[in-house]
Amino acid sequence: MNLINRRALLKAGAVVAVSAGTDLSFAAQSAPTASATQEPVGVPSSAQGENTTKILARYLVNARYDDLPPNVRKEGVRTLLNWVGVAVGGSRHETVERAIRALKPFSGPEQASLLGRTERFDIMNAAFLNGVASHIFDYDDTHLKTIIHPAGPVASAILALSEYHPINGKEFLNALVLGVETECRIGNSVYPEHYDVGWHITGTTGVFGAAAAAGKILGLTEQQMIWALGLAASQPVGLRESFGSMNKSFNPGRAASNGLFAAMLAAQDFTSSDIMIEAKRGWAHTISTKQNFAEITDGLGTRYEAALNTYKPFACGIVIHPAIDAAIQLRNEHHLTPDQIAEVRLKVHPLVLELTGKKTPQIGLEGKFSVYHSVAVALVQGAAGERQYSDQAVKDPVVVALRDKVTTVIDPSIKPEQVDMTLILKDGRQLHKYIKHAIGSLEVPMSDQQLEAKFSDLAKGVLSDAQAHRLMDLCWKVEDLNFVADIAQTARVSKGAI
């Protein structure tokens, strides 16, 4: 398969480095004590979610890198590699350019790098801008159970922090995994009802992940971590109405800076409620009609949502991926050209049309939310990378003509991760393809080699080939780094470079 072709506010106040000691007294008194190896301890919550925030905070404070199973560490490294690639790839997008122009006059000290660029910003704004860049192509990682894009809020926050508060690679990877674990577990507790009413779950839960990860790096005490989660709960960001506009990538960027903001305040004992997640008037009850607090607390340290992360081979909404996969496979198997196709018939899950039902996208960002454009461009070009979602691509006469031949039918028997495609050719032949699991899913994951190809493709035109190779190598070897900030600094571009 031709996997990928590629992409064609806060002013920081006084930021203080904090490295607070860990106070385990509460955990020792109110929960089963940790073993001599200090393995993370979670306490099952009641049906009402009693002490959910405290249980989660206790786990985060106690959890160590050595506790992470090998498969979870490996997925954490893959998550980092994929995120760095998409952040570099999106760094020159018009959305990022506009955000930089808006924020530069008000930015604080130059503390942290913007990946793929020459500029440095204060850590709050750097976290925001890298978060925007990493999501603008809709090419980032996905936790399929909740459609959360986990890395954007978390990695954007802690990589910026690492340039101001030096840490090694093991500390960074542990914080990254814990942040992803936090946001995905909280997402599980309210999905899909929370998403269905219109919240962009990457933003609303990503702020928790960023706060947890940043708080871990800052060495928050249990009480401070509780406050950090509480302050994060007070900052949900993102509505699905923003999809198809620059505002969508604002959401993970803002979640990154908001979570970092929460952890910084908590480090100075800025208080919040101790039950902000589970309280009657807290986060879960306020923004969702569903609350399953056991999803947050059960199996902490033994069941890892972070191990379920997936990576996109196509630069668009995940629900279109089965249709793109089917289109590319049929095109390649039968050596099809657009003029041979009379009609394209799709049987899809209702969510496909709800999220990606734009029939006549006018700009590239809208094309990412059009199953019609995505199928047409995949059949025409055999790919669905960033170049296939440019403004030029959505107006290509050949693509538009084929797009108008795509029809969709909602079929309740089709799951969100599936599609049933039939091509009617002008010579009367009918070609059929049923996709049970698309490439990039847990069942058909992208390989390390495919992730590297995606990374290299995204970096073209931004970094030199040699720089991109060095950067990939640092990501793969993150656990061996003495200073993880080397990744951010290697991803910078010198003035006068490409």
Image: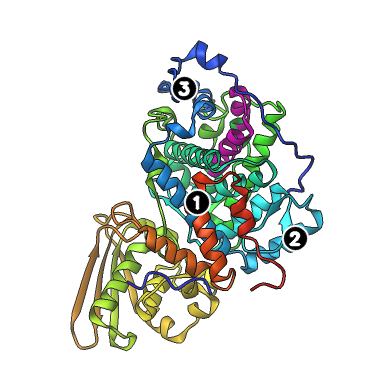
Asked whether, in this view, residue 405 is left or right of residue 436, the answer is right
Numbered circle sitting on residue 482: none
Q: Is residue 135 visible?
A: no
- Pick whichever of labels 2 and 3 is earlier in the sequence: 3
- Residue bearing mark 1: 80
Q: Looking at the picture, which amino acid does disc 1 mark?
A: Leu
The magenta-colored residue range is 206-228
Write down the quadrant of residue 340 in the picture: bottom left
Give residue 463's position: percent from left, percent from top: 59, 68
Residue 23 in the image: above or below residue 203? above
Residue ID for mark 2: 102
Distance of mark 2 from mark 3, alpha carbons?
46 Å
Question: How far apart are the alpha carbons under marks 1 and 2?
Answer: 28 Å
Dominant secondary-structure state across the stretch colored magenta: helix
Foreground label between 1 and 2: 1
Name the front one of labels 1 and 3.
3
Does 62 sit above or below residue 336? Answer: above
Left/right of residue 163 with respect to residue 55 in the rendered view: right
